[in-house]
Image (tube, rainbow, N blue to C red):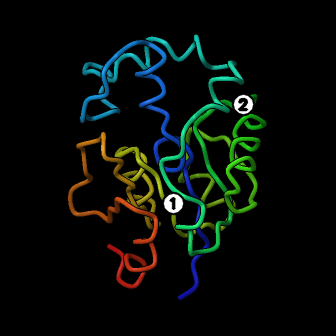
Amino acid sequence: MKYSIAVDIDDVLAQFYPAMCKRFGTNIKQTNIWNPEGPASLVANNFHIIQNNKRFWLSLEKESQPEDIDFPVTCYITASPSLMRGFRKEWLDFWRFPQAPVISAQNKAQVMRQKDIDVLIDDKPSTIRAVQASGLIGIQYVPSYMNEIVEGGNFIRHLSQVREVLKNPK
């Protein structure tokens, strides 16, 4: 079966959490980066400082390599505010990720339905759960610095695993 696939950017393609740790002088810990009470609270507490900082966004290191994407990318769906889409596109182009539109959305499952997208690769557990609850396929990318995996779901630690997961998705 041929799938239409969307990919999140932060902590899937780009090392956002490590960059935040570096920027705010905190050691990177393996943690649930989505727990606002834990070590990752620095993201929620300081996002407003880096939100419009183009230099910060363009300096993010790669989490994944463009050549590891061996599937067609329909679009990139990011929770970043729409005003930051240009930064995100510039970063993707700089690192030579596949050309595709960048969409900003808080409700990624809704965008997937509107755009006829079957699969989302994302790191956020609640997003994966929402996508799955919508009857779509969510593949959780789990970076080395994250320790929460959606129970009973599809998860990968490397983009080269996407095709294998799509042979028999949960």
Question: At label 1, which amino acid type do we have?
Answer: Leu
State the image coordinates of residue 152 (x, y, percent, origin top left). 22, 63
In the rendered view, does 152 fall on the left or right side of 112? Answer: left
Q: CA distance from mark 2 to mark 1?
A: 20 Å
Q: Which residue is mark 1?
A: 120
| Quarter residue 89 falls in | top right
Residue occupying image coordinates x 72% and y 49%: 102
Which of 130/1 is in front?
Answer: 1
- Count neighbours of disc 1 (C-alpha within 10 A) and say few if under 14, some if 14 to 19, many if 20 or more: many
Which residue is painted at 54% across and 58% down in the image?
65
The disc label shown at residue 12, or none: none
Q: Image point 57% across, 46% down: which residue?
A: 9
Nearer-N-terminus badge (2/1): 2
Residue 84's label in the rendered image is 2
At mark 1, the secondary structure is: strand
Please name which of the two marks, 2 or 1, marks the residue nearer to the observer.
2
